[in-house]
Amino acid sequence: MASEPPQSGPRNRGRTLWKLGVRTAARGAWIGARRLLPGESDPTRTLEALGADWVDTLGELKGAAMKLGQFASQFRGAIPDAVIDRLEALQNQAEPLPFAEIAPLIEAGCGPIEQHFRHIEPTALAAASMGQVHRAQLQDGRAVVVKLRYPHVHASIDDDLRQLARVMKSARLVNIDAASLDASLKEISARLHEEADYRIERQNLADFQAAAPVPGIQLPEAVDALCSETVLVLTDLPAANLAFAAQATDEQRRAWSDTLMRWLLHQVLVSGLIHADPNPANFGFLPNGEIALYDFGCVKRLPAAVIAQLRSGLVAGMDSDWHGVHATLRALGALAPRAYDQPDRFQPLYADSHQAALAPLLADEHYAFGQADIHDRLQKLTPRYLLHSRDFRSVPDLIFVGRTLSGFYWMLKRLDAPVPVRKRLQQTLDRDIAAAPRG
């Protein structure tokens, strides 16, 4: 029977994560010991068991614990593949709570149900790590969706992240230095605290509306009178999901793919207002080629200086100016001090990274995302990146940019349509950096 996990209290959650840490450390020690034995060096089965344990535990806990597991699943290369393969299940794993437990939460957030709603669908439309969504109809007849936050989510964020950071460090699960891990977790914590407060999500939606997104992006309207910290009521924008869209006509898939590309480039290189939760469930595909957005909880605001650095670094890469690329990485804080004055040392790595990722996108008038293999090309470079792990630093401002790029890449690959990337990129670079909301 689905119900709120018994570990929801801070003490119980801490105990559950502590036990996970003990099991993780034990498996890590076992892997280390096996490497000393002849013919016993392959850790795959132990790592798979470790990943499955994380999925079961974090999926049951929901909240920040599950969210961090979802983030971790996107860092292939920094975390062993066998663990990542299991953690990817967290992207889709979330059991909704029964409506009998949800109804009091809705009333606590926006008042008596019968006063505001003609009807609320008792079966959840969607469920995620921090809350779930139900379709409903207001008393005035408008179709809406009601999003509500699970209890204890906000209060557990810091403790969950602290416990999981301890687990990652003690088990040496993440192949980055402790300082970079701490900086990354601090950035993740900031976004999670924002995501857990639906008043901030409502403001994020207002900021996207004010930023005038590219043509073809449809945004809902908030029903302000019914929104609170724990409940968000938005007008319903029914549309097809990605699985359906992937089977649509060539013309429709081209239109959706072009819209996604234009909007992605606009976010990163113009507005700096980043929709940083690119789960396909947060996108709806309309018959006219437009795209509806459903979730505004995880939003990253890039400083204008960072946008300018990204633009200059991109132009340098397009021109094969590896000294310019190196200077951009230093300005972004992506280089360790020991690497500051050695641009020539990294030129082969920069050139090969360009050939793996950027050059294919720009080689022809259109890029066929259905045949995209950029992920495989970059994966082959992972051992070389790891050799330079002491030379590079994680950039907290870019963690969610990377997440967004990855999510859009996989959606575009699924839509399997040619996209005029070179043309759209040049059009975007010709635009000035917008004065987007930075609050």
Image (cartoon, helix red, strand yellow):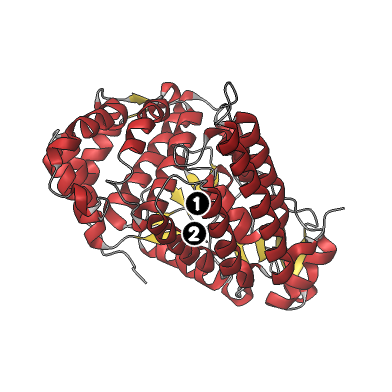
Q: Earlier in the sequence, mark 1 or mark 2?
A: 1
Q: Is residue 275 left or right of residue 229?
A: left
Q: Residue 85 at what x, y percent from top left? A: 59, 34
SS at mark 1 in the image? loop
Seen in the picture, residue 112 relative to 253 is either above or below; the reply is below
Q: Nearer the viewer, residue 312 or 255?
A: 312
User: On the rendered structure, is 321 left or right of 335?
Assistant: left
Residue 392 is situated, as x and y percent measured from the top left of the image, at 29, 47
Percent x, y of residue 92? 65, 43
Relative to 364, say whether 302 is above or below. below
Q: How many marks?
A: 2
Q: Which of the 4 image quadrants contains residue 21? A: bottom right
Q: Which mark is residue 120?
A: none
Residue 265 can be seen in this image = yes
In the displayed structure, does residue 223 sit left or right of residue 344?
right
Distance, label 1 to label 2, CA atoms, is 6 Å
Name the residue tied to disc 2: 298
Left or right side of 52 for 219: left
Q: Residue at x 25, y 31 (%)?
A: 354
- Identify the residue at image location x=55%, y=67%: 222
Do the residues under discs 1 and 2 have CB atoms within 8 angstroms?
yes
Q: Position of residue 384 (x, y in %)?
A: 32, 32
Q: Which residue is identified by label 1?
A: 277
Going by the numbered disc 2, the residue's amino acid type is: Cys
* Residue situated in front as seen by the camera: 55 or 49: 49
Given the image, on which type of amino acid does mark 1 rest?
Asp
Q: Nearer the viewer, residue 149 or 193?
A: 193
Q: Residue at x 25, y 57 (%)?
A: 306
